[in-house]
Image (cartoon, rainbow, N blue to C red):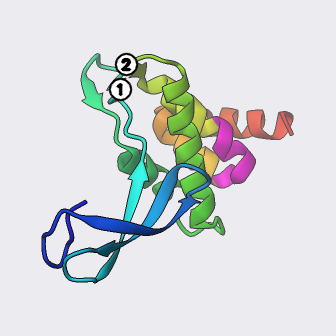
Amino acid sequence: MKCPFCGKTESEVIESRVVEDGEAIRRRRKCTGCDKRFTTYEKVRINSLWVIKKDGKREAFEKDKLRRGILRAIEKRQVPLSKIDNLVDEVEREMLRQAKDEIPSRSIGSAVLKRLKKLDKVAWLRFASVYMEFEDLTDFEKAISKLTVHN
């Protein structure tokens, strides 16, 4: 590991611990050249997921793009950001478990809706209105009736 201070490539690990619910390892290191300490994180790097959009176009799966869409849906709602981060992580893991390189956007949208419904009904409706391309008030009424009937 290259030292960020002096550039030397040798360091010793002082401490290691599991972080991010077992998704990463945090290592505290000490440079053998300058004796300064720094922290590194080790994460599993996965193969890229591709999203197949409704129009057939392919684009790389972007966790941040998914998070931004969900954040728009929960705007001004009392939903902790930690729950949104967990939701995004769960959706990503679900898509990876499918063991496919290409995932239809509808699969991602459905996975988000399933989780948002449990988290916040208003956010669910906002996300659904974009994901399901609501055209008019009737579409909202149908969605609201489904929400109230299933609860």
Q: Which part of the image, by quadrant, shows the N terminus?
A: bottom left
Report whether 78 appears left or right of 67.
Answer: right
The location of residue 105, given as percent across then percent down, is 42, 26
* Residue at position x 66%, y 42% in the image: 115
Identify the magenta region.
114-122
SS for tag 1?
strand
Task: State the image quarter where residue 38 is shown.
Answer: bottom left
The location of residue 123, given as percent across then percent down, is 61, 52
Residue type of the residue flagged with mark 2: Glu
Magenta region includes residue 109: no
> Which numbered marker is on residue 41?
none
Q: Is residue 136 visible?
A: no
Q: State the residue position of label 2.
A: 102
Real-space Cα separation, disc 2 to disc 1, in angstroms: 6 Å
* Residue at position x 61%, y 45% in the image: 125
* Residue at position x 34%, y 42% in the image: 62
> Which secondary structure type mostly characterizes the magenta part of the structure?
helix
User: Eyeballing the image, is 84 above or below 60?
Assistant: below
The location of residue 3, given as percent across then percent down, is 21, 70
Q: State the residue position of label 1.
A: 51
Q: Is residue 119 visible?
A: yes
The local crowd at label 1, few if under 14, some if 14 to 19, many if 20 or more residues have their Cα within 10 Å, is: many
- Of the numbered discs 2 and 1, the one sitting upstream in the chain is 1
Task: State the image quarter where residue 68 is shown.
Answer: bottom left
The location of residue 65, given as percent across then percent down, is 36, 47
